Amino acid sequence: EETRVLPVMHGVPLHYAASVIPIGARAVELEMKRLLAGAWRNSGLSDDLLEDHAGAIVSAACRVQARGANTSGDAAAKGDAAVYRCAGKDVRIDAEWRTMPCEVLFGYKNRGGEEELHGVVEHSLMTAVATTLARLNIDSRLVVENIVLSGGMACVPGFSKRVQEELVFLASRLKRGNSIGSLQCLARARIIRVPFPPRIVSWCGASLVGSVETLRELSLSRQQWREDGMRLVDRSALA
C-alpha cells in the first residue's frame, strides 16, 4: 500500500533521507478493479472474486506505457487486449485497461504521461525520489545514477524504463530556487539491473546480510528497538 525510497551510500543506508508515499501496488489493483468491474460482472463473476484476483490480474495483464505515448495511436502502439480466465470464464481486458492502472504510480489520471496530473502531485514515484535527494548533500545525490527497483510492480513490463523517463522529464521541469529545483542530477537517473528478480531482490539482500559473521554485533534487541528505533539502525550501519 506504499512505496519507499531509501538511499544507500557506500553500503550504508541513509534512513534520515528515506521517503514513503501512500501509493503502491494496492493503488494499481484498485484502479484495475474500477476499470474491470463491468466486464467482470457481465461475465457472471462476483465482486469477491474480483477482489481476490486483482493482484493476479495486474501481474498477468498490466504493462507500463512509455512516457508521452499517444493514447489515440494505432493498434501496435496500444498493444493487444488480454484475456483473464477465472472460475472457467474468460474476461476480456482491453488494451487501454492494461496500461491505465499503472499511471497512478506516476501521478497521472490516464496513461502515457499526457493527461492532467492528480491534485496531490506529491504522491508519485518521481517526487518521492526527488524528496529523498533533496534531503541529501550534493555529493550523496550521485546515488540517483544507480537506482535499484524492488517489489512486484518492478516486474511489470515497461516499468523500469518509464521510471527513468519520468525522472529525466522531472529534471527538465524543475526550476532553480525552489525546494527541489536544484536537483538537476535527476537528469542522470539510471535504473540498474541486479542478478535477482525484482520481486525478491530485497529478500536476497537480507539473506546476504544474514550470512555476514558480524551480524550479531549489528543486531538489535526488541527493547533497544522500542527505546531508540531507527537511530540505532543508523548508528549500527555507520559502525
Image (spheres, helix red, strand yellow):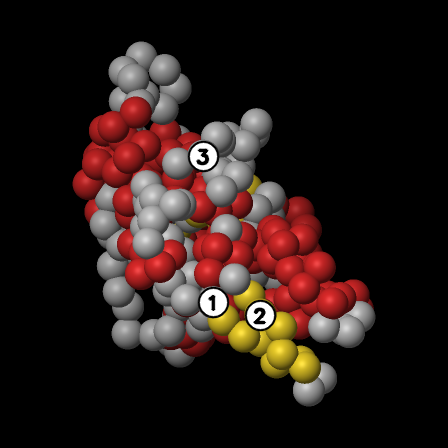
Q: Name the residue under label 2.
A: 92
| Among the 4 quarters of the image, the one containing residue 148 | bottom left
Residue beneath disc 3: 115
Can the viewer see residue 209 in this picture?
Answer: no
Where residue 168 sits: x, y (%)? Answer: 26, 38
* Viewer-closest of 83 and 51: 83
As helix, strand or loop, the secondary structure at mark 2 comes to: strand
Q: In this view, does 24 lie above or below 169?
A: below
Label 1 crowding class (10 Å Cα cut-off): few <14, some 14-19, many 20+?
some
Residue 112 visible from this viewpoint: yes
The structure residue drawn at horizontal position 25% and vertical position 28%, both measured from the top left corner, is 172
Indicate which disc, 1 or 3, sits on the residue closer to the N terminus: 1
Q: Nearer the viewer, mark 1 or mark 3?
A: 1
Question: Which of these two is toward me, 66 or 233?
Answer: 66
* Percent of width and height locating residue 83: 54, 75
Viewer-nearest of discs 2 and 3: 2
Badge 3: few (under 14), some or many (20 or more) residues near its Cα, within 10 Å?
some
Upstream in the sequence, badge 1 or badge 2? 1
C-beta proximity under 8 Å, tags 1 and 2: yes
Q: Closest to the observer: 30 or 25?
A: 30
- Please give the residue where the numbered disc 1 appears in the rendered image: 81
In this view, 27 is above or below 107: below
Give the amino acid at mark 3.
Glu
Quick one: SS at disc 3? Answer: loop
Q: Locate residue 10 relative to residue 154 in the image: left or right.
A: left
Residue lying at 27% horizontally and 30% vertically, measured from the top left: 171
Q: What residue type is labelled 1?
A: Ala
